[in-house]
Amino acid sequence: MSQPAQAGPARPVSFSDAARAAVEALLTPVDAELTRRYPGERSARQPVHTVYVPADAFGAHTVRTWGAQALAVFDEHAGTPARLAQALGVADDAVLADVHARVRAKLAREPIEDLRIDFEDGYGPRPDAEEDAEAVRAAKLVAATAADGSAPPYFGIRTKCLEAAVRARGIRTLELFLGTLLAEGDLPDGLLLTLPKVSHPAQVAALARLLTDFEQRAGLPAGRLGFEIQIETTQAVLGPDGRATVALLIGAAEGRAVGLHYGTFDYSAACGVGAAHQSPDHPVADHAKAVMQVAAAGTGVRLSDGSTNVIPTGPAEQVHAAWRLHHRLVRRSLARAYYQGWDLHPAQLPTRYAAVYAFHREGLDAACARLAGYLAKVGGAVLDEPATARALSGQLLRGLDCGALDPAEVTARTGLDRTALHALAGR
């Protein structure tokens, strides 16, 4: 009786060529769309704050004047590390001593990182001839300060919004400013434009169209002009159909959106929050900023928190109370990955830099140790992944950019220079 033939090893089942081709056909356009919409972090430095100055108050010496006033209040109320610790209600330690010296040097060297000449709420309605002249004057001053090196790293204007009542005026101011600036020479690096009170994606698309037209008529490279979108209306966060609107605003900008700035007071008022409770840490602010954060993630669009209108002026106890509030709010924003905010007065600059510098100095040793361990593949109490390495590198780069950290100390602890940090951060 014959034995049944022995079956050979089963052949593994594989995907067909047709199935693989179908996957490629399905996902290739998706790959392109994801790359377009989510290009990743920008490599350029992000300022730690934006200072808004009404157009009629802006002059050639604005930055120098703000620096001098900030230094004066700093020396008067926080002339030593111990006095700064007392003013802020924090521990007087080695970190604070280092921070104190760095803050003073920063106020003397570069008191403002980003300056916005305001033609909107801070300027108000004016006769057309007056605003025309102011727009031309502002452009000439920006060109002059950029040429002589006295301008801050970033600067630009905030026009009136594109709502019907002020649309023509806002467009006219932008046209005069850009046209005059270009007539004075090449558009300077660091130029930023801000569109306020956005309530519909079509308003963003309209500004993008205007800038495209200007570039074409001026012979500028496509995409040379970017702009920030201010989130200060409820419609910018939640649309009438229940969809989150922020992502639609970014998309409508067609790659020109460089930042989302939260507007504390307009947004809070729109939500019915009373004046006494309008603050960057109010729950309505946290909700709006959380939506902004998710919408902007991976797009290269940067986030900025709003401001506090509690100004550090008057007697010492009043200055110290305002400083403690501002310092706490800035630290809170930093912990929530909002690395930029608004400052409204020179006396807020000391606590802006004190908070930012302490945040980076306190995290220096741990960040460097974790990054060095990750690169050396040394195990520890925390198992870090590439995403964490990107975050650590980004954290160190932010500290370097603003002056909280020195290149030599970062390289000594990690073995990485700025170029290597940029590569690791995926910028």
Image (spheres, helix red, strand yellow):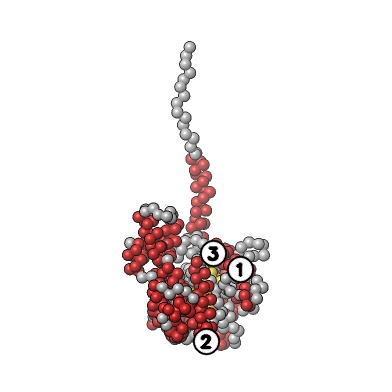
The answer to which quarter of the image holds residue 372 is: bottom left
Nearer the observer: mark 1 or 2; the answer is 2
Mark 2: amino acid: Pro
Q: Secondary structure at mark 3?
A: helix
Q: CA distance from mark 1 to mark 2?
A: 31 Å
Q: Earlier in the sequence, mark 1 or mark 3?
A: 1
Mark 3: amino acid: Gln
Q: Residues within 10 Å of mark 2 (few under 14, many from 20)?
A: few
Is any part of residue 88 visible from this angle?
Answer: yes
Q: Is residue 392 above or below residue 134?
A: above
Name the side, left or right, on which 294 lies relative to 85.
Answer: right
Mark 1: amino acid: Pro
Name the one closer to the observer, 225 or 148: 148
- Kindly identify which residue carries mark 1: 283
Picture disc at residue 293: 3
Name the side, left or right, on which 149 lies relative to 55.
Answer: left
